[in-house]
Amino acid sequence: MGRGTRGFVGWDLDADRVVFDGDESRSAELDTHIPTVLGGGDVKSDPSRSDDPQCTAAQKLNDVASAPGVVVRIHYRIVIKQIGRRLKDFEHTVELVIGVYDALLGHQRAWVKCKILHRDVSINNILLLGTGADCRGLLCDWDLAQTEEQLNDYETTQGLRLGTWQTMSALLQQYASKRHQLSDDLESFLHILTYSALRYFAPTGDGVNVQGIARKMHEHFNVTTTRGLSEVPDGVPWA
């Protein structure tokens, strides 16, 4: 059965103009795996005097406002319908995998249907709703997201390398001028599972060096050295 799409010409009583009214049967699946926004906006600096939003001032104090890469940030608030748990608070493997899988579905829909790329896929940006097999995941914090048009514009993709270092793709970390691509976000989902498995599951077996694993995790996910970069094998060339 199709969607039964129909169209009507209507009249907007508020705007006093002709409008087009689309009529169809939508999918019954409402779970987009993305938080529902109830409201939000910029925080005003002084509502009684002006509509100017609050913004950072550190760059002015340091006299580096014109320096390359320095971004003036504006204070805003957003209200979300769902109240979830952090992904790292999962109770067992099922919740971890479901949370990451659902977040991947939300990411897929945003890209396929809207051509919007998240650009900061990390363990801190996935929320869990429910428990056990009924658990569901949400991909949140879309403030670094960009449209496909923005991604293809070299000027808008340059500047500070923003994102979460622990789950950022290897090529983004290694090449400062690389444009953020779909493949980089997909790689981040894999890093989330690897990081979570190594950090939150106790290693088993005889002769396991827990301190050695912790040290290697810190070196791999949190810091980098010239020697470490030299040991990264060549991958697929990027454009």
Image (spheres, rainbow, N blue to C red):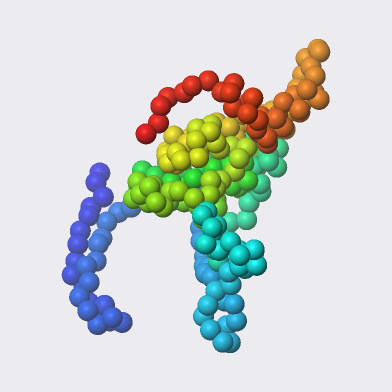
Left or right: 141 as drawn, with respect to 8: right
Picture quadrant where residue 83 is located: bottom right
What residue appears at the point 59 percent right and 27 percent down from the top-left corner? 229
Most extreme residue toward the top is: 206
Relative vertical location of residue 30 with respect to residue 226 in this rendering, above or below? below
Q: Is residue 151 visible?
A: yes
Query: Residue 31, percent across and down?
Result: 47, 48
Most extreme residue toward the bottom is: 48
Query: Residue 137, percent across and down?
Result: 56, 44
What residue appears at the point 52 percent right and 69 percent down from the top-left corner? 41
What residue appears at the point 57 percent right and 76 percent down from the top-left corner? 44
Query: Residue 159, percent across and down?
Result: 49, 50
In-front residue for pair 68/53:
68
Query: Residue 237, percent across and down?
Result: 41, 27
Relative vertical location of residue 17 with respect to residue 92 in this rendering, above or below? below
Q: Is residue 136 visible?
A: no
What residue appears at the point 49 percent right and 21 percent down from the top-left corner? 234
